[in-house]
Image: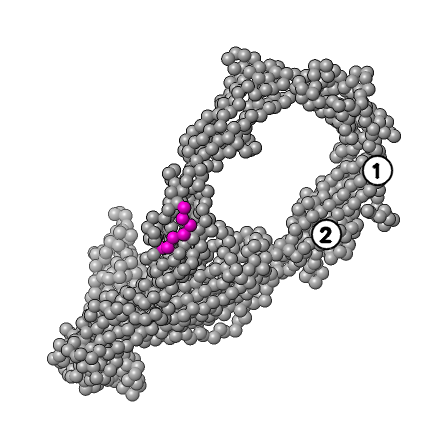
């Protein structure tokens, strides 16, 4: 009960009269403030918080900040109901705002909305240290984003320059939680400079870090590393209805495969997705039942790793029942109730005219007075949000009135049926009701009832009940009456009822229905299935109907026919035909039986698991009125994601009364799931739900590696290669290979073990291995259950020895300041595959830094380049083959030429010949410096502009005549010496076509028609 201590409340007293919106109403929100993030660097100098209501008379507005009334000043102003904040200041204007709207009918308070100030600082300008990683290992580059608000950042990484963003794949991953870049297996191509790019969508700002050099360190052979999860989603809280993304990424070589599962259940069906090669698990429209433990598993051939994340699902408040505006009679009782859901449970309280009024989920009013009128708000909140429901309560008092709701003027009733006259005048306090027929006052009897709500009910009516009926209403404020007439019609009767039918799926059936009725009334037929009216538009594929009004010309007799086409199991049931007039209706029904293929079996379980068989049990599904003749079992390999396949069973034919079968010919150590289908004479039904997944027991392997080969390699080595066994044939844990080999003519085998199931090569090193010797090799697989059979033997050769002889250098000669040529006498050995030439500067460079050139065995000379001018070089040559490098030749010493002239020629003039067919280019003599080669002459390249090649001229003079061409040409002049070509000077010659003058011009006016520009 509500206590009426209203001294602190502003009240509105309503006059005792009927009212509607035209007479006024309290404020109703049409627009409310919303949470706002204001960028601290925003060029805008104001924030606008919206507030608008519909009210009569119009509402007045005021605002609160953190529950304190806002005073309008230089910073705050009102624009209608909107609050305008000028020159926002974080220290003054951050907080929670609410809008208060009032008029003479009451006050309402808007939802709270926050103003927060967003920022994203720049990254530190300190240089980032380089990251050195061996090829094959994983790498993590730290982003370390700068201070920011809010937290909704997105991250990308750039390589070397903007905007070259790194594409993400199964090897590279960027965490959207930390911003770090993860590379599972570093490759040489990953070398470069990396920068973390951070974007804040809330304030539309982006920044990027200083570049981080990543330096892969080359390895002779890439090592393998087990999966190691580095990106681990922490325990996560989510709201019901939200989307959630969980992250998981692992380092390792080979690149780990990532899989997700829900430890305490199944992943949400149709509401989850896995992307980024398994690194991201997306859960959509999260529900409370999705709460639980989620596990990601990363594995490769070297090992596995796991991580578990607990997902907690909570919920913001939501209305189950809320208040609305209502008008109630004075003196009556009323309950105003609000019910909510949410996790944790929301706290509910009420406001009246903007002030606290109740701390429970409902308000109970007894003996309503005008003082109870006002604007009420129900507010529900928990830590995830606040929701508001508003309603206006009006208390009404007045004399009875039938103006809005008179007694129905004309009421039709079927003979022997039932009719009810409603009497609902507008009145408060509640009036007393009485009825009359004509001038006769009516009282309750066996056929006549006046109900407490004022309604008049007549039973088993006849023609004598026709007439005028008047309702009288009276209270302490006055009285009123209203009159209506009753007309009695003939009753509707079913003359032909639909008949029962029995059909198979895919068949058709017809049902007929006929009825007699009062000829003055319209009749319609309504068909329904199991009390659900058939929608002929939506279900026109299976249903159609026809209707015959005034059947055979007879008034008051009609019929309808229902056609059911291509019937399915769902069409079976009780069909009802209802003949309906505006006055009465009557129904007749019939049963339709539809027989079809069986339903899915239930409760599929698996037990008695061996390495190659399991027992599958199930329970019978519905036979759909046709006995089940047989069952079929299907299976699929979960890891291989195979399609469903028919299983081999014992017995081969599973009878229709069976509830179990043994599935045979399965693969050992394989994860399977099974399902069952049932068949009868009408077909095979849908499959059962899959069984829980099981893994068959381990067994010895039966498949050996294939394609055994090898040979070659370094000296005293035997290299063996093969194609690994596919994972489905491992048949057990701890899978690996045993290699047996021996010289072809020996009797004793040497055995070695390889534990990596993905390995493809083994190199046996032994100084006692003779070179180029034929070996017999065979292999078999093993696992924790034992060894499998050997493969067919293969024959390979051990590595040859390195060349024993050294080449003899025949000639070394410097060609220029940067090039030389070396010739040697080849080694007379068939095993030589080529030659390596090494050269380095004597005393200035060590032998380890020597430049190297590889030359095929068919050649005995090569050119050496990238040499330094005027330098002493040492040169040596050695032969090599697959086993390595042989001894080096004697070293030869050469001296490179001095450097070519460093200064380009200075072009002094260009002059066209008087004939107009050639042009002369002249330049100053180039003087060599003391450390440069003497100028021997000049090279002139005459080429078409835009073309890399042209005509090359040589001359010892300081000028040259060149033919004048039609198009634009470039002339390049450079000095040449024994040290090579010097720097170039360039001039552009405009073509003759662009320089032709009018034929009326004299000869001298044709001179110097070329446009020349000197380019040094």
Residue at 13 percent of width and 79 percent of height = 829
Residue at 25 percent of width and 71 percent of height = 779
Residue at 48 percent of width and 34 percent of height = 572
Q: CA distance from mark 1 to mark 2?
A: 27 Å
964 vs 653, left or right, is left
Foreground residue among 193 and 572: 572
Foreground residue among 366 and 441: 441
Q: Categorize mark 1 by other alpha carbons within 10 Å: few (<14), some (14-19), many (20+).
A: some
In the image, farthest residue toward the bottom: 843
Asked if residue 48 shows in the view, the reply is: no
**What quarter of the picture does the C terminus occupy?**
bottom left
Mark number, residue 331: 1
Decide: is 591 above or below 631. Answer: above
Percent of width and height locating residue 792? 21, 68
| Region of the chain picked out in magenta, as a range | 657-663
Residue tagged by mark 2?
348
Q: Quadrant of residue 931?
A: bottom left
702 vs 52, left or right, is left
């Amino acid at each position: 009960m509500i206590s009426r201590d209203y001294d602190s409340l502003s009240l509105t007293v309503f006059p005792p009269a009927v009212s509607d919106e035209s007479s006024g109403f309290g404020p109703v929100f049409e627009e409310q403030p919303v949470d706002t993030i204001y960028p601290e660097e925003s060029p805008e100098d104001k924030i606008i918080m919206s507030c608008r209501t519909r009210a009569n008379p119009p509402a007045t507005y005021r605002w609160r900040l953190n529950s304190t009334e806002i005073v309008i000043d230089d910073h705050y102003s009102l624009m209608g109901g909107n609050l305008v904040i000028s020159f926002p200041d974080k220290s003054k204007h951050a907080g929670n705002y609410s809008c208060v709207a009032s008029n003479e009918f009451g006050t309402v308070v808007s939802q709270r909305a926050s103003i927060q100030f967003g920022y994203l600082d720049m990254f530190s300008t300190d240089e980032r240290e380089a990251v050195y990683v061996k090829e094959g290992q994983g790498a993590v580059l730290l982003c370390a984003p700068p201070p920011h608000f809010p937290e909704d950042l997105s991250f990308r990484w750039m390589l070397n320059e903007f905007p070259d963003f790194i594409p993400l794949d199964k090897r590279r991953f960027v965490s959207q939680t930390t911003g770090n870049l993860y590379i599972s297996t570093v490759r040489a191509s990953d070398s470069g400079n990396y920068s973390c790019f951070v974007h804040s969508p809330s304030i539309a700002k982006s920044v990027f870090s200083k570049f981080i050099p990543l330096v892969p360190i080359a390895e002779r052979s890439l090592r393998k590393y087990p999966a190691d999860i580095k990106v681990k989603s922490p325990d996560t809280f989510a709201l019901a209805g939200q989307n959630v993304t969980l992250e998981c990424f692992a380092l390792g070589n080979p690149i780990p495969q990532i899989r997700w599962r829900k430890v305490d259940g199944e992943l949400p069906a149709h509401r989850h997705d896995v992307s980024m090669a398994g690194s991201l698990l997306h859960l959509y429209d999260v529900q409370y039942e999705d709460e639980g433990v989620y596990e990601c598993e990363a594995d490769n051939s070297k090992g596995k790793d796991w991580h578990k994340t607990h997902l907690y699902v909570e919920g913001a408040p939501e209305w189950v029942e809320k208040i609305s505006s209502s008008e109630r009679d004075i003196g009556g009782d009323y309950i105003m109730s609000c019910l909510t859901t949410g996790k944790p449970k929301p706290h509910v309280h009420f406001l009246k005219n903007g002030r606290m009024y109740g701390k429970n989920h409902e308000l109970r009013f007894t003996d309503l007075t005008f003082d109870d009128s006002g604007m009420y708000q129900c507010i529900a909140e928990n830590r995830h949000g606040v929701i508001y429901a508003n309603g206006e309560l009006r208390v009404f008092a007045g004399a009875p009135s039938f103006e809005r709701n008179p007694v129905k003027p004309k009421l039709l009733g079927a003979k022997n049926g039932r009719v009810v006259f409603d009497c609902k005048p507008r009145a408060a306090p509640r009036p007393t009701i009485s009825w009359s027929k004509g001038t006769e006052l009516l009282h309750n009897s066996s056929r006549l009832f006046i109900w407490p709500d004022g309604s008049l009910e007549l039973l088993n009516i006849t023609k004598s009940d026709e007439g005028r009926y008047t309702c009288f209403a009276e209270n302490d404020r006055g009285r009123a009456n209203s009159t209506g007439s009753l007309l009695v019609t003939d009753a509707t009767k079913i003359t032909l009822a639909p008949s029962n039918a029995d059909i198979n799926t895919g068949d058709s059936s017809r049902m007929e229905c006929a009825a007699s009725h009062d000829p003055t009334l319209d009749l319609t037929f309504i068909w329904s299935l199991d009390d659900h009216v058939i929608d002929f538009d939506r279900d026109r594929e299976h249903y159609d109907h026809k209707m015959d009004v005034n059947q055979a010309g007879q008034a008051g007799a009609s019929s309808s026919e229902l056609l059911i086409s291509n019937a399915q199991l769902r069409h079976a049931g009780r069909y009802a035909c209802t003949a309906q007039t505006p006055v009465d209706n009557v129904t007749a029904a019939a049963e339709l039986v539809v027989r079809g293929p069986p339903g899915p079996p239930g409760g599929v379980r698996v037990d008695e698991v061996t390495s190659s068989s399991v027992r599958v049990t199930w329970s019978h599904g519905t036979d759909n009125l046709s006995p089940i003749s047989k069952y079929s079992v299907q299976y699929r390999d979960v890891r291989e994601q195979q399609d469903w396949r028919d299983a081999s069973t014992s017995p081969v034919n599973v009878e229709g009364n069976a509830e179990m079968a043994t599935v045979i010919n399965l693969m050992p150590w394989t994860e399977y799931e099974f399902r069952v289908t049932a068949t009868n004479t009408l077909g095979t039904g849908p499959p059962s739900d899959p069984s829980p997944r099981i893994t068959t027991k381990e067994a010895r392997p039966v498949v050996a590696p294939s394609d055994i080969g090898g040979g070659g390699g370094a000296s005293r080595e035997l290299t063996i290669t093969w194609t690994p066994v596919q994972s489905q044939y491992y048949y057990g844990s701890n899978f690996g290979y045993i290699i047996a080999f021996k010289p072809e003519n020996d009797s004793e085998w040497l055995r070695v073990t390889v534990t990596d199931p993905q390995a493809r090569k083994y190199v046996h090193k032994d100084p006692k291995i003779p070179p180029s010797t034929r070996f017999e090799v065979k292999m078999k697989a093993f696992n924790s259950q034992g060894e499998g059979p050997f493969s067919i033997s293969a024959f390979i050769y051990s590595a040859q020895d390195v060349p024993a002889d050294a080449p003899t250098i025949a000639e070394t000669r410097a060609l220029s300041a940067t090039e030389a040529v070396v010739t040697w006498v080849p080694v007379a050995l068939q095993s030589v595959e080529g030659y390596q030439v090494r050269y380095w500067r004597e005393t200035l460079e060590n032998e380890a830094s020597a430049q190297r050139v590889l030359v095929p065995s068919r050649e005995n000379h090569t050119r050496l380049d990238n040499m330094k001018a005027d330098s002493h070089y040492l040169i040596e040559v050695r032969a090599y083959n697959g086993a390595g490098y042989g001894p080096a030749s004697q070293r030869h010493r050469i001296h490179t030429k001095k450097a070519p002239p460093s200064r380009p020629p200075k072009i002094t003039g260009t002059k066209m010949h008087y004939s107009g067919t050639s042009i002369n280019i002249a330049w100053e003599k180039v003087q060599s410096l003391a450390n440069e080669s003497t100028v021997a002459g000049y090279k002139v390249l005459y080429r078409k502009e835009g073309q890399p090649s042209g005509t090359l001229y040589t001359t010892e003079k300081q000028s040259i005549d060149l033919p004048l061409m039609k198009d634009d040409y470039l002339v390049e002049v450079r000095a040449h010496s024994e040290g090579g070509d010097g720097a170039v000077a360039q001039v552009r010659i405009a073509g003759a076509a662009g320089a032709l003058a009018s034929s009326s011009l004299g000869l001298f006016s044709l001179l110097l028609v070329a446009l020349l520009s000197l380019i040094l």
